[in-house]
Structure formats: C-alpha cells, structure tokens
Amino acid sequence: MARYTGPVCRICRREGVKLFLKGERCYTKCPLNHKKIYPPGQHGQIRKKLSEYGLELREKQKARRMYGVLDAQFRRYVEAAQRSRGVTGEVLLQTLERRLDNVVYRAGLASSRPEARQLVRHGHFAVNGRKVSIPSYQLRPGDVVQVRPKSREMVRLQQLQEVARTRPTPPWLSYNPDQWEVTVVRLPERSEVDAPVEEHLIVELYSR
C-alpha cells in the first residue's frame, strides 16, 4: 500500500485539527485558520453524530496521519505497546515520538514530519556515527543523531539549522547546533508530547 500523495490540507480538515503536514504554510495558509473547519467533500458540511467506534477510529486516524505511519505499521506499534510494561497509550506515543524522522522534526532540522522523512530517506543523517536512512528507526536514550558532513553544505539544511537555533527543543532532547547533532536524553513523558490525540481511545479501538 502506497502512502497518501494527495492534498494534505484535506487530511487536517477531515480530522478537524492542525497536523502540521506542510511546515510553515500551516501557520499562514491553513484552511482551518479561516472558514473551512468542516470535513472535505460534498457531504462535509452535514453534521453527523459519531458512534463510540467512530470516535475511536478518528483518534487512530489522527495519530496515524500526524506521524505518517501506515495502518499495518501502526497496528504493530499498538501490539508492541500492549505487550510492554507501563500505560499502553503512553508507551504508544513514546514509540511514535522516538522515530528518527520525528526526532529530526522535533529538533527543528525539518519544518514538518514529511520533510524530515524525506531528508532521512535521502541519507542526510547518521545515528551514533552510522548512516541511517530508515525514517521509522527507533531511537533510544543516549543515541546521537547527526547531520552527515557532506549534507551540512545543503542550503536547505543550513536554513533549517538557523531556525533550530532559536526554536525550543523538547526537554527529552538535547540539540547542539555547533555540532549539528541531537541527543536523546530520555524517554518523553506524556505532558511533553503535544500530540492532540486521546490515546486511550486508540487502545480501546484495538482492544475490541
């Protein structure tokens, strides 16, 4: 199954919240900033009361689309979280946050998760000194993500680094702009994850 390649503003309108899939444009030209707060399509303006299952499904779709994860992979994340210790919903969010493309985005080295995914795919980053081009690569506390030396000459990455210097970094990450590196200090806590999802509904969906 291929990834969605259509207009991403439709996704945000469908979920009713900003998922920040287009970087800077989400702050200026987002339809949700104006009047298009209803879902896309010819029946979008018809208000429907969602069932319990519908609410759970929307939360799952929201999280999946925000992090750019396909349905089968998302299910594996949930199943792994159910087998692990701790609160399942929080473990799921920790797994999503520890993806390499998300850490690159959180550190400010990409304006959106789709851009971070593309940069990782093109081999611009190394983890603990080794090139990694897998966006879903799971980082652990102590791992160091660096922009590869040749990639530091890219104009786009230089622009992003200047923005990252002034952008606040999540407490569970440490960004060193002079060394072009991001260190995973610890696992993120739920209060430090600004994902607008109710993870307990996702767990209930997969527990049916």
Image: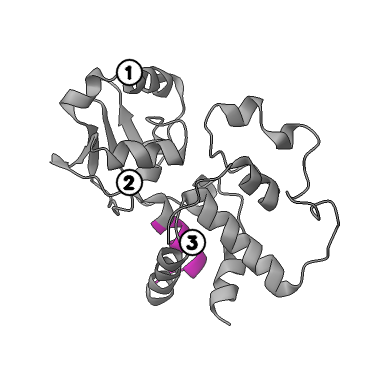
State the count of labels: 3
- Classify mark 3: helix, strand or loop: helix
Q: Residue 100, which numbered label?
A: 2
Q: Residue 90, which numbered label?
A: 3
Q: Residue at x 55, y 45 (%)?
A: 6
Contact check, label 3 and label 1, Cβ < 8 Å: no
Q: Which residue is mark 1?
A: 158
- Classify mark 2: helix, strand or loop: helix
Horizontal side, residue 46 vs residue 80: left or right:
right
Horizontal side, residue 146 vs residue 112: left or right:
left
Query: Which sits in the foreground, 17 or 1?
Result: 1
Mark 3, residues whose alpha carbon is within 10 Å: few (<14), some, or many (≥20)?
A: some
Find the distance from the CA under tag 3 to the CA under tag 1: 34 Å
Query: Which sits in the foreground, 165 or 77?
Result: 77
| Residue type at the position of mark 1 | Gln
The percent position of residue 145, horizontal first and vertical second, equals: 25, 38
Question: Could you say which quadrant of the image residue 27 lies in?
Answer: top right
Mark 2, residues whose alpha carbon is within 10 Å: few (<14), some, or many (≥20)?
A: many
Q: Is residue 87 magenta?
A: yes
The percent position of residue 61, horizontal first and vertical second, equals: 58, 60
**The C terminus: image quadrant:** bottom right
The percent position of residue 115, horizontal first and vertical second, equals: 41, 36
Magenta segment: 85-95
Which of pointers 1 and 2 lies earlier in the amino acid sequence? 2
Q: Is residue 35 magenta?
A: no
Find the distance from the CA under tag 1 to the CA under tag 2: 19 Å
Up the image or down, 68 lies above or below 57; here it is above
**The N terminus: image quadrant:** bottom left
Horizontal side, residue 27 vs residue 171: left or right:
right
Q: Residue 178, which numbered label?
A: none
Q: Residue at x 68, y 74 (%)?
A: 53
